[in-house]
Amino acid sequence: MLLEYFIFGLITFLTTVAQCEVTEVFAEPGSQAVLPCKSSPSSPFSPAIIWSRVGKGTVWRKQKSGLQYWGSNWSQKGTQRAQCPHFQFERGDYSLQIKDLRQDDGGVYSCRVEHGGTFTETRVTLRIIKVSISPSVPIWGSDVSISCIVTPWPSRATVQWMLNNSPFVPQTGTPSNRETAESVVREKATLKLTGNWTCVVGYKGREERALIALTVKGIIQPQKDDTKVYAAMGSAVTLPCVFSPGLIPSSPVWEKLKPGSLFKPALDQLPASFSPSSPSSQSSWDQSASVTEVGFGDEGRYRCSGTVEGQRLMRNMKLVVAKIENSIPSQKKASKSLSCQLSDVSEVIDYEWVHLVYDHNGTQSVGSIQKGKTLSLSKASEENSGEWACRFYGKEGILGNVTYHIPQMSALSGKKSSGVSYNTAAVVGLSILLLVLLLVLAQMYKNHQRRKRIFQYPALETIVHTTSNEREERERNRQKK
Ligand SMILES: *[C@@H]1O[C@H](CO)[C@@H](O)[C@H](O)[C@H]1NC(C)=O
Ligand SMILES: *[C@@H]1O[C@H](CO)[C@@H](O)[C@H](O)[C@H]1NC(C)=O
């Protein structure tokens, strides 16, 4: 008997506690909320249930007979936004489901269950938590406000903001007033603000969240100022400037900025082969420009700008030109040294030389790979000739490449050897000529000598002859005397 009283007392106590406690339910607009209502089924008869909004009439009710009624706001054109699933009744669960939640659904709801003459009432507060962005897609640089509204606003609730899952402390505007019905972040729309915004409402030791994604309209490519565009000297390059799809900038302008004039930019001459439209741009929101043949002097800062909805949007970028410097060490004629040169190396962390090999079909494949900024080829061999590409890498991966063609070594050395043979031939020819000349000279000398000897004898003959003649004459004269 005493035990029975005790149990009865306990039950009464528990039910009073249950009745005192007001359940809180948070939900976002458009979603579905479940307002809990449970009572232990104490009789075999089916109960009568009334769900109502405190001060605003019935939402849904069911009579003991099983007949159901919906309040006028909750059943439209045959579809009911609020319902109580029957299959849960057996377990004493009379929870109300509300779908397609609206901001004004927030408020206090009451669930009354009548079981064989005993009434139990449960109260549930439904709070609609909503984040919104105004304007929904702001233009880069314009004002944007992100607000968090809870209806009804829970007193002594705290609001925190998270941007892409890290806490966001508003730099401008007032800290969220705990007593006002909303918390608003007011900022200038930039890339930093894009992403998922979460409003975290702290209330009675629990945290409720609502999320919204923010995108900013403007120049979407390049995404950041001072983006570097890499190009090999002599190649063509596209300087990107793409606005958000559908944005048509008025009076678009491309400019080259003089170096060292960050604050008061002076204009420089655009490259000779600069064209304010690129072959790839097909839409009017793509204002990319192109340079058909990049020179080393074309490196530097470029700026594209255009006016959108009264706002002048601009983006700076830097053209970095890569070239290969060829230095042949004078001591060793056969070795070759190529060095990869960039007009700006601030982002480059690594270099790599790749030998490009082409098969008979002209298909390119990668041969040997050397690390480092400078390529040193010790021997001038056939296998080192052909195309070499210097690839340069940044933190995020490859930034670009520049290629160099080493002429066929065999052709070079062949020319060299034929030159040598030509020289020897000349020398040999000259020697032969000299020899022949010498021989001729010798022969001439010999002839001369011989002739000299031949002439000696006739001279003698004449002398003999004359002497004999003189003798004969003398003898004749003597005979005459
Ligand atoms: C290259 O050509 C040969 C025939 O000459 C063919 O068998 C081979 O599949 C081709 N390779 C490629 C990559 O096209
Ligand atoms: C060099 O860059 C061009 C353009 O980005 C690319 O098509 C080519 O495959 C690159 N070559 C090498 C060897 O990386």
Image: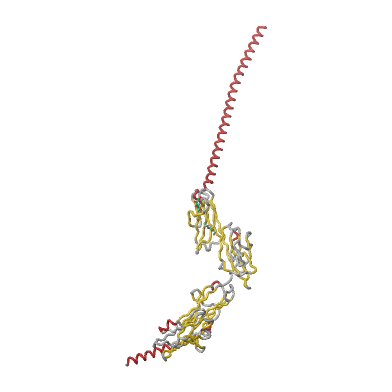
Residue 369 rendering spot, x and y as whole percentages: 48, 55
Specify the quadrant of the image occupied by residue 115. Answer: bottom left
Q: Is residue 225 visible?
A: no
Residue 424 appears in the picture as rendered: yes
Give the color scheme: rainbow, by chain, secondary structure or one colour.
secondary structure
State the count of labels. Answer: 0
In front: 216, or 6?
6
Quadrant in which the N terminus is drawn: bottom left
Q: Is residue 316 above or below residue 172?
A: above
State whether residue 213 is above or below residue 60: above
Q: Quadrant of the C terminus?
A: top right
Is 466 on the left-hand or right-hand side of 339?
right
| Residue 226 percent across, percent down from the top left | 56, 66
Q: Position of residue 171 (x, y in %)?
A: 54, 77
Residue found 37% across the figure and 90% down from its top: 10
* Residue 471 rendering spot, x and y as whole percentages: 63, 11
Nearer to us in this view, 284 or 350: 284
**Residue nearest the observer in this picture, 109 or 179:** 109
